[in-house]
Image (spheres, rainbow, N blue to C red):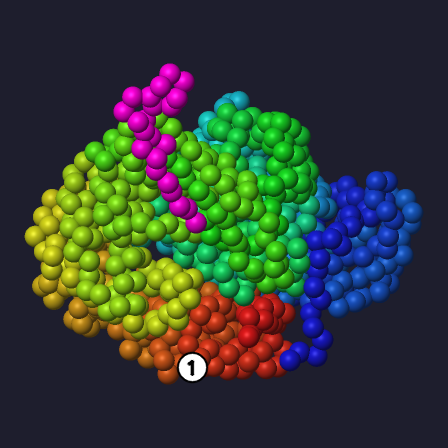
Amino acid sequence: MKDAAPATIYLTDYAPFPYIVDSVHLTFRLSPSATRVTSRIAFRPDPDAPPGPFTLDGEGLDLVWARIDGAPVTPTLTDTGLTCEVPDAPFVWEAEVEIDPAANTALEGLYLSNGMYCTQCEAEGFRKITYYPDRPDVMSVFTVRIEGPEPVKLSNGNPAGSGDGWAEWHDPWPKPAYLFALVAGDLVNHADSFTTKSGREVELNIWVRPGDEDKCAFGMEALKRSMQWDENVYGREYDLDIFNIVAVDDFNMGAMENKGLNIFNSSCVLASPETSTDSNFERIEAIIAHEYFHNWTGNRITCRDWFQLCLKEGLTVFRDAQFTADMRSAPVKRIEDVIALRARQFREDNGPLAHPVRPASFVEINNFYTATVYEKGAELIGMLKTLVGDDAYYKALDLYFDRHDGQACTIEDWLKVFEDATGRDLSQFKRWYTDAGTPRLTVTETWTPGRDTAAPGEPAGGTYTLTFEQDTPPTPGQDEKPPRVIPIAVGLLNENGDEVRETTVLEMTETRQSFTFEGLSSRPVPSILRGFSAPVILNRETTNRERAFLLAHDTDPFNKWEAGRALARDGLLATLREGAAPDPLYLDAVETMARDESLDPAFRALALGLPSEEDLAQALHDAGHTPDPLAIWQALEALRDARASAMETTARTLYDRHQVTGPYRPDAVQSGARALTNAALAMITRQDGGTQAQAQYDAADNMTQQLAALGNLIRAGRGDAAVSAFYDQWRHDRLVLDKWFSLQILNADPADTPDVAARLTDHPDFTLKNPNRFRSVLGALTMSQAGFHRADGAGYRLLADWLMRLDPLNPQTTARMCAAFETWRRFDENRQALIEAQLERILDLPNLSRDTTEMVTRILGARA
Ligand code: B3K
Ligand code: ZN
């Protein structure tokens, strides 16, 4: 173990910073290994805060000099910053530090990516640039001067002058340091403009490395659509003269919403039909929107402290999901989001890393940029909107923007806005923010038929009662889970499939609660949790016939999809528990659905998807069984084979009928058609051994078709030629090469997965230094459940080996990837022991980062 356990920070310890920062002036003299940063910061004691010492955060800085009001001072330097005696009156702090961007492999603070300077400051990276109160509740106006030979020099806000070897920027909007950004290098721009609703013209740029100019057009269109949408739907207008996006190859996450200067992982902004898939296009559009929407939800209104992260992230994810739903298909977006929520957030919420949407403590905040904070955080906004209704939701949002613009806020502020706007008491709803864990919602029903002739005053028709019970299992540090308010959207169908009760939202507030529907002429079929109205696990005893009926008739697209998914899942679980053969009822029902030309092809493609290996492992574990990853994979394979043979003709028909002709467009219609034909291709390949896939590969003129064909060829065991042709074609394109690495691992036979991944780590194009490339191999390994969990532990060993190499260079990415081990307690004793040994090995690494130490310790916390 480590010498000293890293300190835990608690929400309850929050104290305001004792000083106000009136202005910040920064000058950067850029040099790869010796950049000088001078700061001039105007402080004054905060009359509303308890007085306290003057401490500034700083990490890895060489202090050259410091002055207060022009007089040299010698501050006391600590491991985490400095303290200094200061006057009890306004004063100006000045300092110069030297930093080494070229040596910065952690990609936090100021670093170099392919010779280009760039920054990442959220959450606590600004302290690696200069001494500063690096906390989100300290907001100030920044002026930045950049000196250096680089042709392009960018920072936040508006341009404030430039000349030979220098450029200045001024950001008039007070912001916390985590939104600071600087970029400098040899960049080219794709330019455009947008006129806001009040008539202001905004210059827009996407900055890229020379050679990537042809991959900016889609991102630019997405940006303009986002700006327009936020004006139309939330009334939010952009507030600077310029909005810059920069694409960077070496980046720890997707993108960053720095004020007026968004920095993107190049994989999340560069797009072209030849190099990007339909899903890449959809994701790029969503991330551009997300970062842009942060301008109001995150930047103008920010977080008081990092415990409030969901205040900006949950809301902004919710907003970007609304945007995608409006731009594309709302049902398809909802289904995709729920698939991802269950795969990532339910997994997290039911294991050792479970934490509340608003955590109460952390060691390293970077470890809390999680599916729970983001995706469950967004679900909470969705539930609030369902509970209060659309009009009240937008009224509350208007109040939020009016009341809190320019402030650093809390979840309490957010809920108070809704209480004030609607008169509702949201104290029970708040439990969703403070209590971790996924509620289980069990439902039973009773039916009392009506009498033929009802006496006056007596209800005619029958009575149908739904009784719900909620229960949330304990999570680390939280044993008791009082009931939460759960909005349950329910509709009722009769035996002909007609809707006899439209969707109503039942508000469950107790542990056990019944809801009655009267005046029904026959026993209805319920459609429960429509639209996935709450992030819960719904348990309901029902028949396969009823599931097939709902797949055919439910008018709620989400529940229609859910019925098919549950039907497939129940059959797979029966195979796993009892060795049952694939269920003919499922095969018939799914074929009928697939042939229904009144249904959106994108929806049909999703409904042809099977539950993931992770879904099945969760379901087995929840029911008290030990999941066997290989058996799960085999059950899925058996069902895929059975379906391919049962649907042979249908697969051909769908493949031929929905082929897209004409020029490629990444829109919902074309991408839906390609998703359906590629779902059909997967079935065809099981029948023809890859002949059709080879033909598609040879004819493909876009990445969606090429990659789908290649995956099928690898799976069919005849991918070798195409794999090497693909490499020769795309070796110059780093983003496509990432796909080439991943695809070979994701489509390998699980018996070979760790070996394929190990072989690829020896490839000359593999590198530890680029997070995208690292994830394309080691991340893909962890995504292939049966392969990663191979019984001999080779997958675990390989991952641990590489995480231990990465940790000294890039703790943030290492720590995140440790989550692959979070499910270890689900498995058999042999696998548990193998994983535990690897976790111990990681923990024994000398100088293991605080990030990784926290993650591994939390995961091991689940030891029996
Ligand atoms: N706010 C950033 C994430 C920063 C992650 C820091 N470890 C991207 C986003 O959510 O928009
Ligand atoms: Zn965000």
Q: Residue at x 54, y 65 (%)?
A: 352
Q: Which of the 4 image quadrants contains residue 402?
A: top right
Q: Residue at x 66, y 78 (%)?
A: 2
Nearer the observer, 364 or 621? 621
Q: Is residue 633 above or below residue 586?
A: below
Q: Residue at x 45, y 36 (%)?
A: 515
Magenta stretch, residue numbers = 442-463
Whether residue 240 is visible: yes
Q: In the image as oriented, which residue stretches furthest toward the left?
A: 649
| For residue 515, side relative to residue 703 (left or right) | right
Whether residue 605 is visible: no
For the image shown, how many numbered marks are present on the structure?
Answer: 1
- The residue tagged 1 is 830
Instruction: Indicate yes or no whether the magenta region holds residue 494.
Output: no
Nearer the observer, 398 or 757? 398
**x, y percent for residue 624:** 42, 66
Q: Is residue 521 above or below residue 562?
A: above
Q: Mark 1 vs ligand 1: CB under 8 Å? A: no
Report crowding for label 1: few under 14, some 14 to 19, many 20 or more residues within 10 A (C-alpha): few
Nearer the observer, 579 or 274? 579
**x, y percent for residue 689:** 12, 66
Q: Is residue 746 above or below residue 608?
A: below
| For residue 680, side relative to residue 421 (left or right) | left
**x, y percent for residue 137:** 71, 46
Under circle 1, the secondary element is helix
Q: Residue flagged by tag 1: what amino acid is it?
A: Asn
Q: Residue at x 50, y 74 (%)?
A: 803
**x, y percent for residue 655:** 13, 50
